[in-house]
Image (cartoon, rainbow, N blue to C red):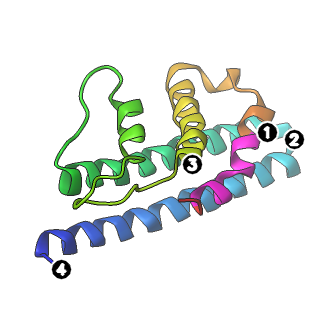
Amino acid sequence: MMPLYHFLIQQLREEQDNLEHVIRAAYRSIAGAKRHSGDQDIYIDSAALNLHGFYSGVEKVFLSIAERVDNSIPVGSRWHTDLLNQMTFDLPSIRPPALSRATRNVLHEYRSFRRLVRNVYTYNLDPEKVAAPVDHISPTYGRR
């Protein structure tokens, strides 16, 4: 294995640890919201922030692959969507698809949620619309 890929593997392992941390935190936040209804907004804010962190971490992984393996990072106003699509490509002699199209479609929802979190005040978030993606985060994380 080339030294360049040793660095990439270490970086991906670190990001994996970070993703697992935000997943656990998101679950704890939703559990707290259920236990403490009077402070539910604080826990929902935390869950939303961790969902934001989840997709941001996934995107960091994809950016690392695009930069160090594909040697091609999307640009332009749609680069987030283009990057997600790029990870479904089979690039013969470079790499197989990093994820399936079905997983891409699920991750697209997390990407959209992240955009929502960036653009609204958290008090406008519907607790059920935050809890639903948290409920699916572990299965999503385990998909290819």
Classified by dominant secondary structure, the portion drawn in magenta counts as helix
Q: Which mark identifies residue 1?
A: 4
Q: Earlier in the sequence, mark 1 or mark 3?
A: 1
Q: Which mark is residue 103?
A: 3
- Viewer-side label of 2, 3: 3
Crowding around mark 3 (Cα neighbors within 10 Å: few <14, some 14 to 19, many 20+) is some
Query: Secondary structure under badge 4?
Result: loop
Comparing 30 with 65, the one in front is: 65
The residue nearer to you, when weighing 37 against 23, is: 23
Q: Give how far apart the Cα atoms at labels 3 and 4 are.
A: 28 Å
The type of residue carrying mark 2 is Ser
User: Which residue has dot 2 on it?
Assistant: 37
Q: Are marks 3 and 4 in contact (CB under 8 Å)?
A: no
Cα distance, mark 4 to mark 1? 49 Å
Left-right relation of 72 to 63? left
Of pointers 2 and 3, the one earlier in the residue sequence: 2
Membership of 64 in magenta stretch: no
Which region of the structure is painted magenta? Answer: 131-141
Amino acid under disc 1: Gln
Q: Are marks 4 and 2 in contact (CB under 8 Å)?
A: no
**Amino acid type of the residue that numbered disc 3 sits on in the rendered structure:** Thr
Residue matched to label 1: 40
Taking the spot 26% from the left edge, 48% from the top edge, the residue there is 66
